[in-house]
Amino acid sequence: MIRRLEHLSYEDGLRELSLFSLEKRRLLGDLITAFQYLKEAYRKDGEGLFVREHSDRMRYNGFKLKEGRFRLDIRKHFFTVRVVRHWNTLPREVVDAPSLEVFKTRLDGALSNLV
């Protein structure tokens, strides 16, 4: 514990130190990995990992992923299920990034309102 931050809450301490919460770091890592799978970095390994949703009427981005429905609650913690909801809400300019570095920069901007 840092002495000058003892009286602050977890969120305020993170802001003071310019750090992200564990939830946001996990989400960033998941979305970066999903981008790599979808943009051919791991194409051979990730064949069929995600299912693309086909629709002409799409808000946010044009590269939406299909969200599955499962009877077991344990499935909601799987990588492919965890990422889909967040991926589908990303703006088009983030999803259509030409490279991983550009994606990371745009993703930070898109998720800047989270702690």
Image (tube, rainbow, N blue to C red):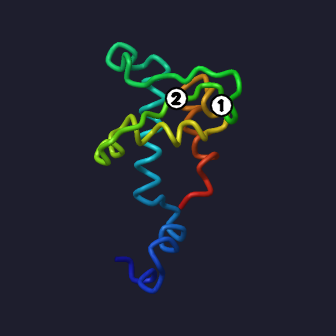
Looking at the image, residue 96 sits to the left or right of residue 52; the answer is: right
Amino acid tagged 1: Asn
Q: In which quarter of the image is residue 46?
A: top left
Instruction: Give the quadrant of the N terminus.
Output: bottom left
Q: Residue 69 carries which label?
A: none
Which residue is disc 2 drawn over? 65
Q: In which quarter of the image is residue 114?
A: bottom right
The front one of 115 and 68 is 68
Circle nearer the viewer, 2 or 1: 2
- Asked if residue 3 is positioned above or below residue 16 in the image, the reply reads below
Q: Position of residue 89 (x, y in %)?
A: 60, 41
Q: Where is residue 45 in the image (x, y as percent from the top left)?
A: 32, 18
- Residue name at image x 39 percent, y 83 percent: 3
Q: Residue 61 carries which label?
A: 1
- Asked if residue 20 is positioned above or below residue 82 in the image, the reply reads below
Distance from Cα at disc 2 to Cα at disc 1: 10 Å
The front one of 17 and 54 is 54
Q: Where is residue 100 in the image (x, y as percent from the top left)?
A: 52, 29
Q: In which quarter of the image is residue 50?
A: top left
- Residue name at image x 31 percent, y 42 percent: 75
Label 1's element? loop
Amino acid tagged 2: Leu
Q: Position of residue 34 (x, y in %)?
A: 44, 31
- Residue name at image x 35 percent, y 13 percent: 44
- Residue name at image x 45 percent, y 26 percent: 36
Residue sitting at the far front = 71
